[in-house]
Every structure is written in C-alpha cells, then in structure tokens.
Image (spheres, grey):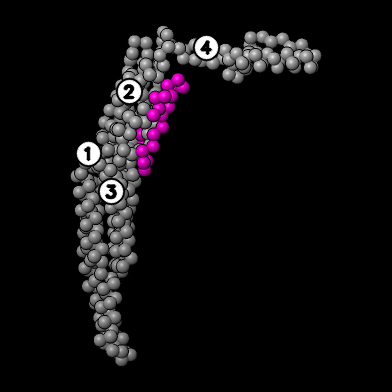
Amino acid sequence: MWMSMTGYGRGEAHGSDVVVTADVRTVNHRYLDIHVRCPSKFLSWEPRVRGVVRDALRRGKVDVFLGVREWGKTGTSVRVNKEALDSFISEANRIKEVSGLPIDLAFRDLLAVPDLFVFVTEGVDPAEEHWDLAAKAMGGALTMLLASRRDEGERLREVVGNAVGGLGSVVDNIASLSIENKGLAIDKFKDRIKLLSGETGMDAGRLHQEAAYLIDRLDITEEIDRLRSHLTGLEKLLRQPGDAVGKRFDFLVQETFRELSTASNKSAHAGISELAVTAKTELEKIREQIQNVE
C-alpha cells in the first residue's frame, strides 16, 4: 500500500477540567521535517511530540498544532518581580530629584513596565499532568492522518500505474519504428554508395564499411531493452508496499528519461523523436505525482 505525504488529522482528549486538541498537517518533503506549536507553558511537550511523529512517519513536512483549554484551577498565579519594581521606583525618584519635575506614579504606569508581573506554576507542572491527554490526542490525529495519506497514496498509485501502462505502449511503438528506421537507413546508404562509387571511383568496400558503422550508430536496440527493463521495474514497484517507494520510483523515472533522450538523439526517424517527446511528457507528469509519495 502506497502512502502519500499529504494529509491531515485531528485528535482530541478530555480530562476532568481540561481538553487537549492536536492538529497534524503534512505535505511532501525530501526528509522528515517536524514543526511543533503549543502553548508556552506546555513547551516541554515538543521533544515528546517529535518522538511520536518519528515513530509514525518517514518523510514529509509535518506541522503539529497542540491546543489546551483549561477551566477551574489553572495551576498558575501572578507574582510581582520585586527587584524590577524596586529598581523602577528608585529610578523614578532619582529623576524627580534631578529634574525637579513632579512625578506621580499610578498603578497603570506599573502595568506598562516589561516583565514586572510574571506567571509562575503552582503545584504539579501542568505539562506533566496533562501529557497523557496530549499523547492520546496525538494518537487520534496520527491515526486520522495515516488513513488520509493511505487513501491519497492509493489514488496516486492508480494514476501512476495508468501512466506507466501508457509508456509501455509508447516504447512498443518506438521499437516498431526502430526496425523500420534501420531498414530505411540501409536502403538510403545503399543508394548513396552506388552513386558515390559510380561517380568518383571510390572503393565500394570502404564505403560499405563506413555505412555499416553509421547504421550501427543509428541502432537503438539496447536503449529499447533498457527502457523495457526500467518499465518492468516501475511495474514491480507499483505492486510493492509503500516502503520508501517514492525515492526508488523517482530514480527509475530519471533512468527512463535518460534512455528516451539517448534513443531520440541516435535515431533519425521523426516518428521516434515524436514518440520520445510524448513519453517524456508523461514521465514529467509521473515525476510530479511521485514527489508526493513517501
């Protein structure tokens, strides 16, 4: 079963006074690239979440969004940074003495002082207390994500399979034209040899030798054999489970593209060149699709 790298999953877990939600989105990427976002007091979850994702996925850009909604006791309280407060008041009094300006401080002035009020955790660390809920929410999100990636992967396999089947027909047509191309080349060289040997008195044996060499350069039998071998490899991958199949498929697509270019360049037949262009266009479509397969 193939696995796409594009998908979405959502999970949710409920406690007595808290709900944890997890949203996971993935798109294609050469490696496994994980990004985690969660509320500030739950930042210690990040390495654990990364580990959970690594256990489930091999490739793709992964964005994880964790949300926590609490009610009742929050486990946090507000404290005044006494050192900052004393320093602020001291500086305000010094400015008043130096400048002689009346400075009347109000509580709203204190609210504007950065880091004067801080939030501190009381009792059990909420990140530790609620991690089991986060793990459960992540499990639900990844289950949904994997299901969507499998569905998309199977759709991609069907689309790519149809394209590979079409390439097989194109290669068969190229093989048929290559036989015709070689026959036409032989007849053309024979006529040219007769003409040159009759007009210039050139050695016919040497001309036949040169003609044989040129005809051999036009032969694309080996390229066709390799093309069929690559297509067989692609068909086998289509039947295999999705174990890093995307990278192997992409490699064979590149090799097929290379053999098509060689066959097109060696052949003097316009029909073969046209078929090669058609096949390359299909290969580009396959390559676009396969970039999304894990």
Q: Quadrant of the N terminus?
A: top left
Q: Nearer the viewer, mark 4 or mark 1?
A: 4
**Which residue is tagged 2?**
135
Q: Nearer the viewer, residue 10 or 131?
A: 131
| Snapshot quadrant of residue 22 | top left
Gap between marks 4 and 1 measured at Cα: 53 Å
Determine contact: label 4, label 2, CB under 8 Å: no
Disc on res. 78: 4
At numbered mark 3, what does the secondary structure look like: helix, strand or loop?
Answer: helix
Please tell me whether residue 64 is drawn above or below residue 128 in the rendered image. below
Q: Nearer the viewer, residue 267 or 209?
A: 209
Disc on res. 248: 3
Gap between marks 3 and 2 measured at Cα: 33 Å
* Count of numbered circles on the image: 4
At numbered mark 4, what does the secondary structure look like: helix, strand or loop?
Answer: strand
* Sooner in the amino-acid sequence: mark 3 or mark 2: 2
Task: Give x and y (percent) for residue 50.
Answer: 36, 31
Other residues around mark 4 within 10 Å, as few (<14) / some (14–19) / many (≥20):
few
Q: Does residue 192 appear left or right of residue 115 in this picture?
A: left
- Start and end of the magenta stretch? 26-47
